[in-house]
Image (spheres, helix red, strand yellow):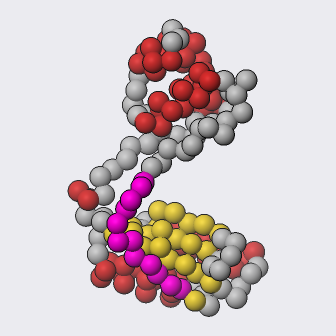
Amino acid sequence: MDKIDNKILQLLQQNGELSTAEIAAAVGLSTTPCWRRIQRMEQEGIIENRVVLLNRQKLNLGIDVFVAVKTSQHNLEWLSEFSAEVSKFDEVVEFYRMAGESDYLLRVVVPDIPAFDSFYKKLVQSSGHADVSSSFAMEQIKFTTALPLNYIQTS
């Protein structure tokens, strides 16, 4: 990785639809070497995927709920079953195993409180939890899918 690779990644994180020619011009390369760099980063798994971000408001998905789960079950079998169950819910857009006060944290996206209530009932029915608590986001202050690139070891 070098500074040119870093710049390519910055550009792709801002707009994954940029053509190789547009990226090459922005980083000061010709198209073929730029394309090779992108291909290498894809092969190395640095670039995992290119996606389209959707407008949540236009899709009637304006509510973020952070669901903290505490459990007395700390074995791999329970984790495997719980992970499989949670992964079935389209409303769960992020799912983490945590260290600290909660064991798991889910970010759930729904249109309204009744939709969340329906989700919640299915979640607590699907597997045994010690405690499930929910926090509703009042306002999204910052949201990005772009990762910070200032930690990359460049050559």
Q: Residue furthest top?
A: 30
Which residue appears at 66% of the width and 24% of the height?
2
Q: Is residue 95 above or below residue 46?
A: below
The answer to whether one can see residue 20 in this image is no
Q: Is residue 16 above or below residue 61?
A: above
How far across and down, in percent of the image, does residue 27 sit? Answer: 51, 18
Which residue appears at 51% of the width and 12% of the height?
28
The answer to whether one can see residue 125 in this image is yes
Q: Which residues, given as a range, are shown in magenta?
A: 132-143
Quarter of the rendering occupied by the N terminus: top right
How far across and down, in percent of the image, does residue 22 sit? Answer: 41, 18
Q: Is residue 128 left or right of residue 155?
A: left
Which residue appears at 58% of the width and 12% of the height?
33
| Count of numbered labels shown in the rendering | 0
Q: Residue furthest left?
A: 58
Near-viewer residue (146 or 141): 141
Near-viewer residue (21 or 79): 21
Q: Is residue 32 left or right of residue 16?
A: right
Q: Is residue 40 shown in magenta?
A: no
How far across and down, in percent of the image, does residue 101 sit? Answer: 65, 80
Q: Is residue 53 above or below residue 17?
A: below
Quarter residue 90 falls in:
bottom left
Q: Is residue 137 shown in magenta?
A: yes
Quarter residue 45 falls in:
top right
Quarter of the rendering occupied by the C terminus: top right
Which residue appears at 44% of the width and 70% of the height?
108
Q: Is residue 69 left or right of residue 116?
A: right
Near-viewer residue (18 or 142): 142
